[in-house]
Image (cartoon, helix red, strand yellow):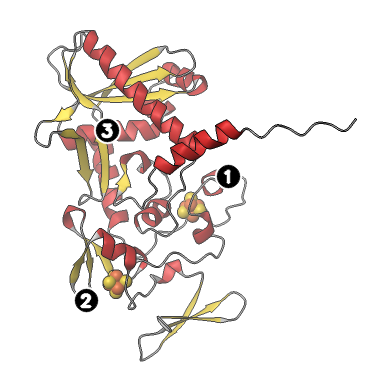
Amino acid sequence: MAALPEPIPHTATLMDAAIVAKAKSFDGAGIPMSDVANECDRAIWMKLRWTSPPERPEGQRERRFRTGHQYETWLLDDLEAAGVEVARIDPATGKQWRVELASGHIRGKMDGRAIGLPEAPKTEHVVECKSHKAEIFRKIVKSPIRESKPDHFAQCQLYMHAEGLSRCLYLAANKDTDEIHTERVEYDPVYCMALVARLERIVHAPRAPTRLHEDPTAKGAFACQICTRLAQCHEGQFSRVNCRTCLNSEPRENATWHCVRWDKPLSYRDQQEGCPAHRYIPDLVPAEQVDVLDNDVVVYRLADGSEFRDGEGR
Ligand code: SF4
Ligand code: SF4
């Protein structure tokens, strides 16, 4: 007898579709703090420059975000229940604490500030809550996050740097067993100053920083193999057309962008739309630049010998 076909999971499919429909997919105005530990300067720069389409929401990923938020609330609730005073909202704004660095182009949301920890009752701490699968949780318990979770260490450091605090309480939960673990992280000014200087340099770089790896298929090029910019960085795909990929745009103070061609500030909507005077930052064209014509058209030669004329026909 022929095997019965696998049943189609209609319910799960519909549940996924429902959560995806509610999710937002958009270009972030800045770089999230969670990305600053990326060892590739170019990947951070390309994200800021909106080279690739924003990630499409997926049911499983959206649920993972939701689980993370839920754990954050539980951990803060439990911290308060233990007698620690926790401020989850910035009284100046009435919203979650926002932290901005590098002219406002690097940004994050801090989980809270706490005072009254038994280990140091008078010291105000940044609070950062994270949930992990068991394997990662075990690593965090075994060694400080500086070694076991450098991306989270960077976040904690930058929050302390921006808030002028000297300690951070890192609160971790194991999603498989619901164990918890705490680590008090000490502010490291030398680390922060070096990281902030690096981020300032990346944000204000008019050209793409050099690649982390020239051969993304090399054994050690793991970062490239999982990089969301791989297609535009290594595989000859053109970047999107918007103000951020245009050589006339500049990031300015207070997270603003400016067009030097028309000498005007660019709103988020302006940046998304671009204009007919868009000319690619040359590093974002997968070809060699060979000429600039009198009519402001930039000529490139592609790998197959054909020409791409940037600015013609727009
Ligand atoms: S593909 Fe590799 S070199 Fe290119 S941006 Fe990503 S990590 Fe950097
Ligand atoms: S020239 Fe046009 S596309 Fe380029 S930055 Fe100015 S407004 Fe944007």
Per the rendering, the mark at residue 71 is none
Residue 157 in sight here: yes
Residue position for label 3: 157
Q: Is residue 238 above or below residue 122?
A: below
Residue at x 17% of width, y 29% of height: 89
Residue 212 in sight here: no
Give the amino acid at mark 3: Gln
The alpha-carbon separation of the residues under discs 3 and 2 comes to 39 Å
Give the amino acid at mark 2: Trp
Give the crowd class for mark 1: few <14, some 14-19, many >=20 residues within 10 Å: few
The alpha-carbon separation of the residues under discs 3 and 1 comes to 28 Å
Q: Is residue 276 above or below residue 68?
A: below
Residue 52 versus residue 38: which sits nearer the camera?
Answer: 52
- Pointers 3 and 1 in contact (CB under 8 A)? no
Q: Position of residue 238 (x, y in %)?
A: 49, 67
Give the crowd class for mark 3: few <14, some 14-19, many >=20 residues within 10 Å: many
Per the rendering, the mark at residue 262 is 2
* Left or right, residue 250 beside residue 289: left
Q: Nearer the viewer, mark 1 or mark 2?
A: 2
Q: Quadrant of residue 274?
A: bottom left
Per the rendering, the mark at residue 220 is 1
Which image quadrant: the C terminus?
bottom left
Q: Position of residue 225 (x, y in %)?
A: 56, 47
Q: Position of residue 60 (x, y in %)?
A: 50, 34
Give the amino acid at mark 1: Gly
Q: Is residue 43 above or below residue 271?
A: above
Residue at x 47% of width, y 70% of height: 285
Q: Secondary structure at mark 3?
A: helix
